Image: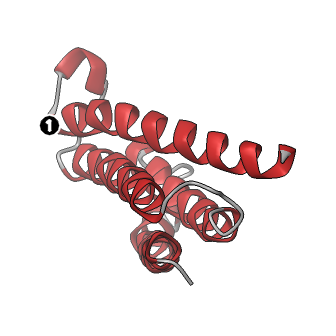
Amino acid sequence: MSTAQRILLVYGTLSITYGMTLGLPLSSIRMSHPAGPRHLVTAHLSALMQGAMHLGLSVAFGFATFTPWVLTASAIALVCGSALFVAGVTANWLMNVGDHFAARSPGWYLLSASGPLHLVGAVVILAGVTSAALS
């Protein structure tokens, strides 16, 4: 198993665990309210989905043909992007932010920083897996 795969595997497991943990306050709130706070629901679901995505990518990275340092950098970018995203929506929930675009909350800045990291990591792995599949 490569370093990139290990990074994705560990983060994926941590992300799923964090998502499940966020389910506890969400369930508690839902016991007395018809809907949970938007940012809490987003944090809960994104942590679960991104965790599963990282676990899947840990397999895909095994097929990529790029040099190990490129794949490791890509994995780090993806993990940092996902961590910033979940941290941003968690911050918005904890700060009780309504519209984070209008408020330009700290969570909004974290969410904004996650985009480029996700994009770079995704493009690198797409190119690496595609080149392996076409060769």
Spot occupied by residue 88 in the image (x, y as percentages of width and height): 28, 45
Residue 65 image-quadrant placement: bottom right
Quadrant where the N terminus sits is bottom right
Q: Residue furthest bottom?
A: 1
Spot occupied by residue 126 in the image (x, y as percentages of width and height): 65, 42
Kindly identify the residue that appears in the image at 54 percent across and 58 percent down. 50
Residue 64 image-quadrant placement: bottom right
Q: Nearer the viewer, residue 43 or 35?
A: 43
Kindly identify the residue that appears in the image at 37 percent across and 55 percent down. 73
Q: Nearer the viewer, residue 99 or 53?
A: 53
In this view, 76 is above or below 98: below
108 sits left or right of 11 in the view: left
Spot occupied by residue 118 in the image (x, y as percentages of width and height): 44, 41
Q: Look at the image and name its color scheme.
A: secondary structure
Kindly identify the residue that appears in the image at 60 percent across and 58 percent down. 49
Q: How many C-alpha atoms fall within 10 Å of the one at disc 1: few (<14), some, or many (≥20)?
A: some
Q: Secondary structure at mark 1?
A: helix
Spot occupied by residue 100 in the image (x, y as percentages of width and height): 27, 27
Give the residue pinned by disc 1.
106
89 sits left or right of 61 in the view: left
Kindly identify the residue that appears in the image at 56 percent across and 54 percent down. 66
Kind of residue sitting beneath label 1:
Pro
Q: Residue furthest right?
A: 134
Q: Nearer the viewer, residue 83 or 5?
A: 5
In this view, 37 is above or below 57: above
44 sits left or right of 110 in the view: right
